[in-house]
């Protein structure tokens, strides 16, 4: 004798799947209810911290950890023509520099000063405590602290 089941009654395997889906849904909603307030608070704190930054900090971004003085890059961008070229000369580490200054100053300057390009014999020189005797024809158009300066040489 074959037992007949009701037409609307799902088979046992389907019931197990439905129960598993319902359990998963309850767990997911529980996690959301517990974690959402913390995640929302974290997002708000991050947004407030970003909103507190001034325009220069937002523009330089990670460069604050590479270049000891923001003014060097801002001055370079103001002085070097958009189609101009520049080079970066890095000397001995100075007080106020981070571990990132010497190895990444040129890389960051190349990014920040786009569309300007680097060129080995460019007249514009971003000097990070460089030996100024190497550039006898160059005059400083801007000088800052920590050995930073912007030089303009002759071709």
Image (cartoon, rainbow, N blue to C red):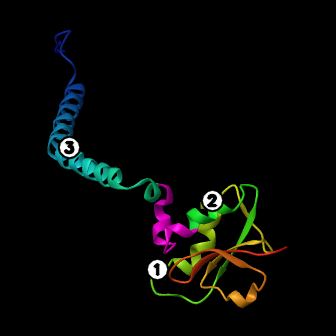
How many residues crowd mark 3 within 10 Å: few (<14), some (14–19), many (20+)? few
Q: Quadrant of residue 150?
A: bottom right
Which mark's residue is nearer the viewer, 2 or 1?
2
Contact, CB < 8 Å: mark 3 with mark 2? no
- Measured in 3D between alpha carbons, the distance from the residue under mark 2 to the one under mark 1, in whole angstroms, is 25 Å
Instruction: Report the residue marked by disc 1.
Output: 98
**Percent x, y for residue 92?**
58, 90
- Residue drawn at point x = 77 percent, y = 86 percent: 136
Contact, CB < 8 Å: mark 1 with mark 3? no
- 8 relative position to 91: left or right: left
- Residue drawn at point x = 62 percent, y = 87 percent: 91
- Measured in 3D between alpha carbons, the distance from the residue under mark 3 to the one under mark 2, in whole angstroms, is 45 Å
Instruction: Give the residue at the far top of this rendering.
Output: 7
Question: For the residue labelled by badge 2, is the local secondary structure a helix, a strand or a loop?
Answer: helix
Contact, CB < 8 Å: mark 2 with mark 1? no
Q: Which label's residue is closer to the chain start, 1 or 3?
A: 3
- Measured in 3D between alpha carbons, the distance from the residue under mark 1 to the one under mark 3, in whole angstroms, is 37 Å
- 99 relative position to 109: left or right: left
Above or below: residue 31 compared with residue 134: above
Q: Which mark is residue 36?
A: 3
Specify the segment rendered in magenta: 59-72
**Percent x, y for residue 7?**
20, 9
Question: For the residue labelled by badge 1, is the local secondary structure a helix, a strand or a loop?
Answer: loop
Identify the main secondary structure in magenta.
helix
Instruction: Report the residue marked by disc 2.
Output: 78
- Residue drawn at point x = 77 percent, y = 69 percent: 119
Say which quadrant the C terminus sits in. bottom right
């Amino acid at each position: 004798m074959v037992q007949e089941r009701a037409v609307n009654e799902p088979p046992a395997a389907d019931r197990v799947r439905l129960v598993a889906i319902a359990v998963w849904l309850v767990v997911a909603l529980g996690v959301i209810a517990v974690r959402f307030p913390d995640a929302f608070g974290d997002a708000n704190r991050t947004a407030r911290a970003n909103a507190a930054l001034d325009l220069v900090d937002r523009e330089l971004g990670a460069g604050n950890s590479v270049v000891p003085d923001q003014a060097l890059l801002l001055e370079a961008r103001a002085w070097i023509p958009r189609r101009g070229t520049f080079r970066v000369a890095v000397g001995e580490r100075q007080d106020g520099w981070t571990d990132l200054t010497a190895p990444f100053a040129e890389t960051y300057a190349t990014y920040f000063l786009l569309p300007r390009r680097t060129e080995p014999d460019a007249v514009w020189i971003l000097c990070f405590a460089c030996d100024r005797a190497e550039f006898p024809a160059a005059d400083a158009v801007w000088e800052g602290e920590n050995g930073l300066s912007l030089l303009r040489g002759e071709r």
